[in-house]
Amino acid sequence: MNIEIAISFAIGGVIGGFGGWFGKLLIAMAKVKFKSSEDSKNEKLKADLEYKTYLKQEEYVAAKVFNKIFYKIKPSVNFPDMDHYEACNDIAYRFERIEIILNDFLSEHSVILEPKIRNEIQDAAIIASYGKLEITSPDISDYANSEASKMYGILCGVKKVFEDLAEKQKNIN
């Protein structure tokens, strides 16, 4: 009977030892799998952050370019006491050039712009496109003047959105 007990204990020890070794092996494998999973999550987060940073940088570049364009479009004071109506006439005279400037901007930056901004600039370009057809004489029609005012208002709104985005970027950094 003692031999049977000794053999039982020996077999139990072997089984227990094997179970312990196998358990350690399973734990090690689980750690490797978990670490690999965490590493891939971290890599994905890092790639997402780099992409978002890239987009913000490109958006900032687009904002700078638009700001430059805006000041090219903005009417200059041609004489003392120039009023809004006369300023819009100045814009209307340049509809054709403004259309080209806005379309060039869109061709380079539209993929990076938020849809609302892109649509606003497209609307302004369309106004300039149709507005240029209204300029048939040195005199600007009331309709062309009002379209110039509308377009300028849209562009002022876009400029404000870009300024707000740039200000947010400053506050983040």
Image (cartoon, grey):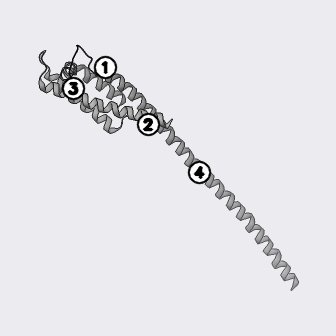
Q: Nearer the viewer, mark 3 or mark 2?
A: 2
How far apart marks 4 and 3 lie (CA) works out to 53 Å
User: On screen, 149 above or below 18?
Assistant: above
In percent of width and height, residue 163 lies at 38, 31
Is residue 45 shown left or right of residue 26?
Answer: left
How far apart marks 1 and 2 lie (CA) works out to 25 Å
In percent of width and height, residue 147 lies at 18, 28
- Residue 113 picture quarter: top left
Q: Say which amino acid is labelled 4.
A: Glu
Q: Nearer the viewer, mark 1 or mark 4?
A: 1
Disc 4 is placed on an element classified as helix
Q: Earlier in the sequence, mark 4 or mark 3?
A: 4
Report the residue marked by disc 1. Answer: 72
Is residue 60 shown left or right of residue 6?
Answer: left
Residue for point 36% across, 27% down: 108
Q: Nearer the viewer, residue 108 or 131?
A: 131
Q: Nearer the viewer, residue 25 or 146?
A: 146
Q: Say which amino acid is labelled 1.
A: Lys
Q: Nearer the viewer, residue 158 or 115?
A: 158
**Callout 1 touching callout 3 (CB < 8 Å):** no
Residue for point 28% across, 22% down: 74
Report the residue marked by disc 4. Answer: 38
Q: Earlier in the sequence, mark 2 or mark 4?
A: 4
Packing grade of label 2 (10 A; few <14, some 14-19, many >=20) is few
Q: Nearer the viewer, mark 2 or mark 4?
A: 2
Report the residue marked by disc 3. Answer: 128
**Callout 2 touching callout 4 (CB < 8 Å):** no
Report the residue marked by disc 2. Answer: 168
Residue lying furthest front: 81
How far apart marks 1 and 4 lie (CA) works out to 51 Å
Q: Say which amino acid is labelled 2.
A: Lys
